[in-house]
Image (cartoon, rainbow, N blue to C red):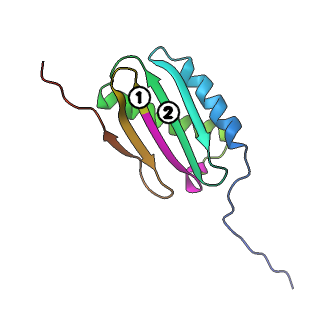
């Protein structure tokens, strides 16, 4: 008797290396000053982009999607976000965190603006 069993196992990858490669890619962009990333060793990935100037929400959405895509690319796992949660933010030197995004397992990217509108 032959028994075949399938399971949905988390891919084996070095998330710290993936985050390092992704960070290098972003540091090459003109609008990015630096990056910071961490992995809790289990399910949670954190990634921060530091920018000098404030960004529009559209620019932030593009950057958050680039984070997601770069982690897929460097992990060589198209389903990486089926196993990991992503917590991302964009921070400016002048205003602190200006956008946050969360990509939970099985959920769409959720983006929140943290900018306070100033009256000129």
Which x, y percent locates residue 69? 54, 37
Give the secondary structure at mark 1.
strand
Q: List the single residue furthest toward the top.
A: 30
Closer to us: 72 or 51: 51
Instruction: Answer with left or right where residue 88 lies relative to residue 78.
Output: left
Up-down relation of residue 118 to residue 111 (above or below): above
Residue wearing tag 2: 48
Which x, y percent locates residue 111? 35, 43
Up-down relation of residue 8 to residue 63 (above or below): below
Q: Determine which quarter of the picture holds residue 27.
A: top right
The reply to whether the C-beta atoms of the residues labelled 1 and 2 are less than 8 Å apart is yes
Q: Which residues are magenta?
A: 80-89
How far, Cα to Cα, is label 1 from label 2? 7 Å
Give the secondary structure at mark 2.
strand
Which x, y percent locates residue 120? 12, 18
**Label 2 crowd bin: few (<14), some (14–19), many (20+), radius 10 Å:** many
Could you tell me which residue is drawn at 65 percent across and 46 percent down?
77
Instruction: Answer with left or right where residue 92 lies relative to residue 6.
Output: left
Could you tell me which residue is drawn at 60 percent across and 30 percent down?
22
Is residue 95 inside the magenta stretch? no
Residue wearing tag 1: 91
Instruction: Answer with left or right where residue 47 lies relative to residue 2.
Output: left
Return the mark for residue 70: none
Q: Earlier in the sequence, mark 1 or mark 2?
A: 2
**Label 1 crowd bin: few (<14), some (14–19), many (20+), radius 10 Å:** many
Closer to us: 78 or 32: 32
Q: List the single residue furthest toward the right.
A: 1
Pick the quarter of the image with the N terminus: bottom right
């Amino acid at each position: 008797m032959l028994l075949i069993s399938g399971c949905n196992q988390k891919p084996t990858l070095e998330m710290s290396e993936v985050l390092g490669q992704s960070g290098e890619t972003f540091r090459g962009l003109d609008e990015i000053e630096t990056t910071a990333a961490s992995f809790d060793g289990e399910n949670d990935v954190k990634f921060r982009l530091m920018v000098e100037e404030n960004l529009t929400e559209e620019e932030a959405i593009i950057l958050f999607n680039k984070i997601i895509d770069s982690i897929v690319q460097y992990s060589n796992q198209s389903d990486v976000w089926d196993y990991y949660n992503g917590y991302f933010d964009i921070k400016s030197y002048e205003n602190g965190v200006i956008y946050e995004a969360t990509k939970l397992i099985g959920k769409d990217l959720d983006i929140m603006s943290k900018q306070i509108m100033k009256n000129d």
